[in-house]
């Protein structure tokens, strides 16, 4: 049973992490109180020396019994409603009902008088208690999802926004502190170990990520993927005004790595999108909703109904897309883009880096709030999408650098170049994530860099 | 004509990190029970205003995407509604504390059927359709007085409290106050003065924006976002009506260039700088679209 009295915004993870019993805590306390009081009363009855104490204990016991009965009735009606709203919580509710029955059985025994005539009623009470206790133990043995969630809670407690899922360090910021208002208060983040939220580790290319307002890495809506030899890379920027864009961005990026799309028409595009769309939808129903509801059960929050998942799937997630293929031997690259995630090609002229090519946007003025993006909904119009597809092909030489960047960083680089500034040059030789974080912080603070998720991939040729 | 004191970039979109505040002031005076015709249906001013506000709240709520961590709407904005007549009364809750988007989404007062104009991407046209929508506010219009100045003062206090509650809100898009009325202030104080007091406060991103929506049965003419008071005089309204309209014009903020730009990008309407946030007999849908786009989160959806 999960009582709604624990609100989701209260810091509940501490007692859970210590292994305290969150389930049926209230009822167990009530049972304990009744049993102790009843035992005391029985003892007092035989203590003829203290008749006054015996009477007092008897009043207290009966008062407690009355309260316990009221509480049971309240729980029963409350759980009835909860269970009828969410079949997924039915097991918890049945455990609760068993526990309640056990308590009622105990109450019945205590109310029954001592004379032999009441032996039958005593028997019924004891029977109810034993059956209920058994069913409670049985239902308690199958709480694997809860345990998984609780384990998750324990693990994620170690994550104060410092390390992303697969070890890429997003260093704590010098000037920005993490916005605590963001995390629907202090619940540890979900999905930190979900593969769709992971960040690949690159060997030759260098990857830098900094989340909007230095939020937790799991709230980053940019996603990237790269093939093992790092000749195919993709970077996608999930649209924050859509729902659950991160897994969608990851799926698109992974799809490029698996199957780069160069020959684009309605049929190939539709076919290319089919698998990621199906997998995103499956993730919403099979991972997202159950994970949230497992946690809701632990925290006592009301469960999300399946209609919330229907709504998410119907509206779909959106993401921009940039896929790049590099052939280092032949000195060539190919790129496909939808939206404002950019590819830059730089060459070095002994003293400084020079921009050779910028794709698909060439200047700061081309950025706006509504970039084209790909919808996860299978019914969305591929014709319309094709109008926004941009493709490019170019050459590169050894020593050149290809850079992929999501919109905020891309706009900043173009702005710097347009203004003749040179701070952007350090990006190309950057090795240290801390220095990247400092740069991002400084530029955000000065109002030069838009406070958005920032991802930069530097690919030496 | 004195342009209201106004400066700022008005560029910070609503987000969980930079939450916004929307305050609606709803005229509930007896004069709001006069009937007007709109889209072939007869409404009282009060009904029209209530329908508009409920749609506006619904569009703010339904535009909020689902937070992957909570499964609820993203918490990027607070809303507050004051009804005003003889008294100033908060309409979303009894305390008058701003309510967040996810809390509003989860607790509507009820559901009703409304007619909405829906854009059909297949045909590229808009058509009327019936839709079940949640509502939060019910219509009452029975007060004798119209304490508009005091309503604006309440908005002022609410904005101050909201800004004080959290330092980070200083970086947000400034609070937006939308006043829906039939234009006749009738009570203590001077609404223009109160409005100008509101213009003095704001965030680092700009001063508070006050928009006025004037609903009326006195005229079938409509005027959207005028830039000059001459445009109101040109409508040749009855004297009292004109006075009310002119007063509201003076109480209206200049629409920031960034919002004009967004409106242009998003639904392709040509607006020129210098226009005021004042609407006379505006189509509710127009108002809703405008505010929606003007306050949208950083990225829209295209393609």
Image (cartoon, rainbow, N blue to C red):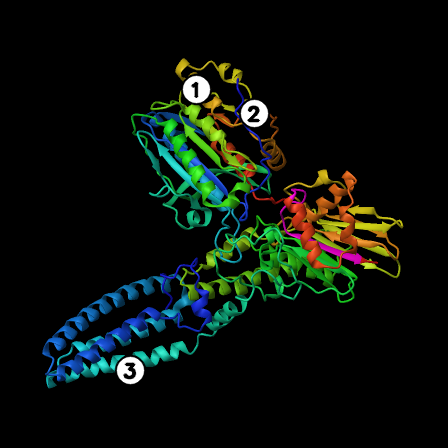
Query: Closer to the camera, B61 or B253?
Result: B253
Query: Closer to the camera, A9 or B128?
Result: A9
Which label number is shown at residue B275? Answer: 2
Residue span colored magenta? A446-459
Note whether A14 is above or below B60 in the view shown: below
Which of discs 1 and 2 lies nearer the camera? The answer is 2
* Marks 1/2: CA–CA distance: 22 Å
Determine whether the residue tagged by mark 1 lies in a helix, strand or loop: loop
Q: Are marks 1 and 2 in contact (CB under 8 Å)?
A: no
Q: Quadrant of the image for the C terminus of chain B?
A: top right
Q: Residue at 79% across / 46% down in the picture? A: A358
Residue A449 image offset from top left, x and y in percent = 67, 45
Query: Closer to the camera, A170 or A387?
Result: A170
Q: Are marks 1 and 3 in contact (CB under 8 Å)?
A: no
Say whether disc 1 or disc 2 marks the residue closer to the N-terminus. 1
Determine whether the residue tagged by mark 3 lies in a helix, strand or loop: helix
Which label number is shown at residue A130? Answer: 3
Asked where in the image residue A35 lies, by quadrant, the reply is: bottom left
Residue A137 image offset from top left, x and y in percent = 37, 79
Specify the subunit that label 1 lies on. Answer: B
Q: Is residue B53 found left or right of A77 in the rendered image?
A: right
Q: Residue furthest bottom?
A: A116
Which of discs 1 and 3 lies nearer the camera? The answer is 3
Residue B58 visible in rendering: yes
Q: Residue at 43% across / 19% down in the picture? A: B219
């Amino acid at each position: 049973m999960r009582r709604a009295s624990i609100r989701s915004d209260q810091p509940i993870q501490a007692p859970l992490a210590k292994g305290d019993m969150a389930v049926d805590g209230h009822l167990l306390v009530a049972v304990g109180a009744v049993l102790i009081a009843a035992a005391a009363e029985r003892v007092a009855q035989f203590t003829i020396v203290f008749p006054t104490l015996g009477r007092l204990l008897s009043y207290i016991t009966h008062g407690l019994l009355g309260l316990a009965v009221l509480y049971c009735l309240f729980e029963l009606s409350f759980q009835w409603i909860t269970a009828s709203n969410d079949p997924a919580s039915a097991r918890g509710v049945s455990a609760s009902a068993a526990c309640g029955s056990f308590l009622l059985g105990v109450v019945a025994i205590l109310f029954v008088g001592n004379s032999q005539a009441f032996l039958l009623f005593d028997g019924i009470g004891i029977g109810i208690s034993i059956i209920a206790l058994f069913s409670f133990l049985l239902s308690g043995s199958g709480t694997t999802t809860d345990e998984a969630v609780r384990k998750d809670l324990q693990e994620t407690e170690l994550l104060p926004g410092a390390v992303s899922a697969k070890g890429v360090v997003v260093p704590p910021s010098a000037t920005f502190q993490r916005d605590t208002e963001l995390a629907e208060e202090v619940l540890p983040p979900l999905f930190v170990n979900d593969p769709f939220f992971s960040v690949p580790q690159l060997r030759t290319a260098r990857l830098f990520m900094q989340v909007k307002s230095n939020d937790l890495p799991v709230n980053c809506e940019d996603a990237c993927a790269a093939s093992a030899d790092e000749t195919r890379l993709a970077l996608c920027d999930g649209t924050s005004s859509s729902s659950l864009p991160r897994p969608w961005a990851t799926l698109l990026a992974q799809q490029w790595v698996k199957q780069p799309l160069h020959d684009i028409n309605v049929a190939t595009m539709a076919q290319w999108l089919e698998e990621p769309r199906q997998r995103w939808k499956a993730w919403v129903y099979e991972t997202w909703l159950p994970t949230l509801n497992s946690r809701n059960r632990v925290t006592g929050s009301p469960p999300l109904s399946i209609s919330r998942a229907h709504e998410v799937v119907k509206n779909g997630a959106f993401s921009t897309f940039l896929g790049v293929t590099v052939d280092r031997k032949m000195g060539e690259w190919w790129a496909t883009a939808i939206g404002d995630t950019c590819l830059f090609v730089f060459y070095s002229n002994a003293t400084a880096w020079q921009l050779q090519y910028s794709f698909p946007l060439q200047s700061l003025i081309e950025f706006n709030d509504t970039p084209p993006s790909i919808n996860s909904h299978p019914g969305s119009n591929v014709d319309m999408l094709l109008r926004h597809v941009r493709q490019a092909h170019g050459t590169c030489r050894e020593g050149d650098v290809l850079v992929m960047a999501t919109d905020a960083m891309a706009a900043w680089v173009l702005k710097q170049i347009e203004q003749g500034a040179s701070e952007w040059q350090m990006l190309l030789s950057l090795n240290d994530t801390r220095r990247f974080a400092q740069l991002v912080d400084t530029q955000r603070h000065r109002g030069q860099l838009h406070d958005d998720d920032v991802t930069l991939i530097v690919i030496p040729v | 004509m004195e342009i209201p004191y106004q400066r700022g970039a008005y560029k910070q979109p609503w987000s969980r990190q930079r939450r916004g505040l929307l305050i609606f002031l709803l005229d509930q005076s007896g004069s709001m029970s006069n009937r007007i015709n709109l889209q072939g249906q007869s409404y009282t001013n009060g009904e029209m205003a209530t329908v508009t506000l409920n749609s506006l709240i619904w569009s703010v709520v339904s535009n909020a995407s689902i937070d992957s961590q909570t499964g609820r709407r993203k918490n990027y904005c607070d809303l507050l509604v004051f009804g005003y007549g003889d008294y100033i009364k908060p309409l979303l809750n009894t305390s008058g504390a701003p309510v967040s988007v996810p809390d509003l989404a989860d607790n509507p007062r009820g559901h009703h059927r409304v007619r909405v104009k829906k854009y059909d991407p297949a045909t590229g046209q808009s058509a009327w359709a019936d839709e079940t929508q949640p509502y939060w506010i019910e219509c009452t219009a029975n007060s004798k007085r119209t304490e508009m100045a005091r309503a604006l003062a309440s908005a002022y206090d609410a904005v101050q409290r909201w800004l004080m509650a959290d330092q980070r809100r200083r970086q947000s898009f400034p609070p937006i106050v939308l006043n829906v009325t039939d234009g006749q202030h009738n009570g203590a104080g001077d609404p223009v003065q109160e409005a100008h007091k509101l213009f003095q406060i704001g965030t680092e991103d700009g001063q508070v924006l006050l928009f006025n929506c004037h609903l009326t049965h006195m005229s079938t003419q409509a005027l959207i976002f005028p830039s000059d008071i001459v445009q109101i005089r040109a409508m040749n309204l009855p004297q009292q009506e004109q006075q009310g309209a002119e007063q509201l014009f003076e109480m209206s903020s200049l629409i920031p260039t960034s919002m004009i730009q967004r409106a242009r990008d998003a639904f392709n309407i040509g607006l020129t700088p210098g226009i005021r946030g004042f609407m006379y007999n505006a189509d509710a849908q127009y108002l809703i679209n405008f505010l929606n786009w003007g306050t949208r989160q950083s990225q829209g959806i295209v393609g």
